[in-house]
């Protein structure tokens, strides 16, 4: 069994409150009560929830629970000039009912995919398998799905994505597929049946040799707002689904990737500093997802990991940040981490709230590094 590393993190909540109090982003999220004591979500303002994190504070306090919409600040940059909150094993959540009897596998999220998307998650990690004559989402092993590792039909989750894209015509959703489907054109069929092909971003439009992606505003205007990557190399030629490692570099996942001060590429990925791939994906989660660890994992150690990986990736900030139990933290959590990334990517500041909304250049407001 691999080793586990525990780090006790303490934060100065008063300093955090002073930093973020009186801040309201252009999406309407209020951060004025961040860090305040609470007894229920009703005590917290928009975009916050009432939560306990014994590693950082006693009792219950208001913490971030939704993202800032970076496109509302600026949508005139290439797709690879933004950061997107990503959920690891998005389908392995606590909400959906059992479909195949007893399930003996780990969970990674608390709410369903629709709730994740509504809270600002913009990239989903899904594991696809052939099972019971169809395509299923499973958290399994050995490339095979079993009754005790199965979650549900892939089309059900894909229909949630379709409904979100239909209701939010200026948003873009990305899928990363750990793909074990062997049925010829099996994935293509399930995407078609879910009604997602009308949003499909084609492989032919994806940049080569590290060039910039199309502008977000152009992807929205052309309605090509659904980006899909597969781990199966053959699918790019046979089904027109982009082979992830042609476009993305990714650090090692699980406990191996959790050593402070280190950030190495996973085996399938090119080195992180390979700039012929214009997208950077950073994982920050343990091999076994535990709620008790998520609070500290999604707090200061996440920011530290992103800083470390910036250097290892050739001074490139992450575009995708993948975590377990994304809503758990000691305050700003993954939402503040993504705000930092978007601040750096959009305007070179440590917080997207310091970027001048609507600016066409890298401009910081007077509240820079607030």
Image (spheres, rainbow, N blue to C red):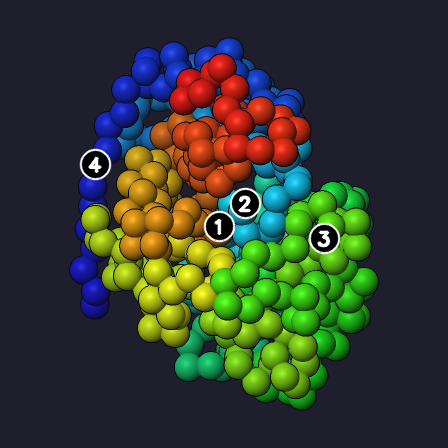
Q: Is residue 306 visible?
A: yes
Q: Position of residue 340 (x, y in %)?
A: 44, 34
Whole-number angstrom distance, CA of label 2 to CA of label 4 = 31 Å
The circle drawn on residue 241 is none
- Badge 2 is on which residue? 82
Label 3 neighbourhood size at 10 Å, few (<14), some (14-19), many (20+)? Answer: many
Circle 3 — which element? helix
The earlier-in-sequence mark between 3 and 2 is 2
Whole-number angstrom distance, CA of label 3 to CA of label 2 = 14 Å
Foreground pick, 338 / 326: 338
Whole-number angstrom distance, CA of label 1 to CA of label 3 = 17 Å
Depth-wise, is mark 4 or mark 3 nearer the camera? 3
Question: Do residues under tags 1 and 2 come within 8 Å of each other at their CB atoms?
Answer: yes
- Badge 4 is on which residue? 8
The circle drawn on residue 319 is 1
The earlier-in-sequence mark between 1 and 3 is 3
The total number of labels drawn is 4
The earlier-in-sequence mark between 1 and 2 is 2
Q: In this view, does 224 lie to the left or right of 287?
A: right
């Amino acid at each position: 069994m691999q080793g586990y590393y525990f780090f006790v993190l303490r934060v100065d909540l008063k300093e955090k409150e002073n930093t973020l109090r009186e801040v309201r982003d252009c999406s309407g999220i209020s951060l004025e009560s961040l860090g305040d004591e609470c007894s229920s979500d009703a005590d917290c303002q928009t975009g916050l929830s009432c939560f306990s994190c014994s590693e950082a504070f006693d009792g219950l306090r208001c913490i971030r629970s939704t993202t800032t919409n970076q496109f509302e600040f600026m949508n005139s940059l290439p797709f690879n000039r933004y950061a997107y909150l990503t959920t690891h094993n998005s389908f392995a959540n606590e909400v959906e009912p059992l479909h195949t009897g007893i399930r003996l596998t780990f969970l990674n999220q608390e709410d369903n995919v629709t709730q994740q998307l509504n809270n600002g998650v913009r990239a989903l990690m899904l594991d696809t398998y052939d099972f019971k004559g169809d395509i299923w989402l499973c958290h399994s092993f050995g490339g095979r799905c079993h009754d005790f590792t199965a979650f549900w039909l892939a089309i059900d989750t894909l229909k949630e994505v379709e409904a979100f894209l239909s209701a939010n015509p200026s948003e873009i959703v990305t899928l990363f597929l750990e793909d074990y489907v062997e049925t010829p054109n099996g994935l293509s069929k399930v995407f078609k049946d879910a009604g997602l092909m009308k949003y499909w971003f084609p492989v032919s439009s994806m940049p080569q040799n590290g060039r910039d992606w199309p502008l977000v505003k152009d992807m929205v205007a052309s309605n090509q707002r659904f980006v899909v990557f597969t781990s199966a190399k053959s699918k790019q030629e046979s089904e027109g689904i982009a082979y992830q490692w042609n476009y993305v570099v990714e650090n090692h996942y699980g406990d191996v990737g959790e050593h402070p001060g280190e950030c190495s590429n996973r085996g399938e990925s090119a080195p992180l500093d390979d700039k012929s791939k214009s997208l950077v994906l950073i994982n920050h989660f343990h091999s076994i997802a535990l709620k008790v660890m998520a609070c500290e994992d999604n707090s200061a150690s996440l920011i530290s990991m992103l800083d470390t990986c910036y250097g290892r990736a050739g001074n490139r900030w992450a575009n995708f940040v993948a975590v377990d139990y994304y809503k758990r933290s000691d305050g700003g959590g993954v939402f503040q981490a993504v705000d930092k990334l978007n601040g750096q990517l959009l305007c070179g500041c440590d917080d997207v709230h310091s970027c001048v909304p609507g600016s066409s250049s890298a401009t910081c407001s007077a509240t820079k590094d607030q």
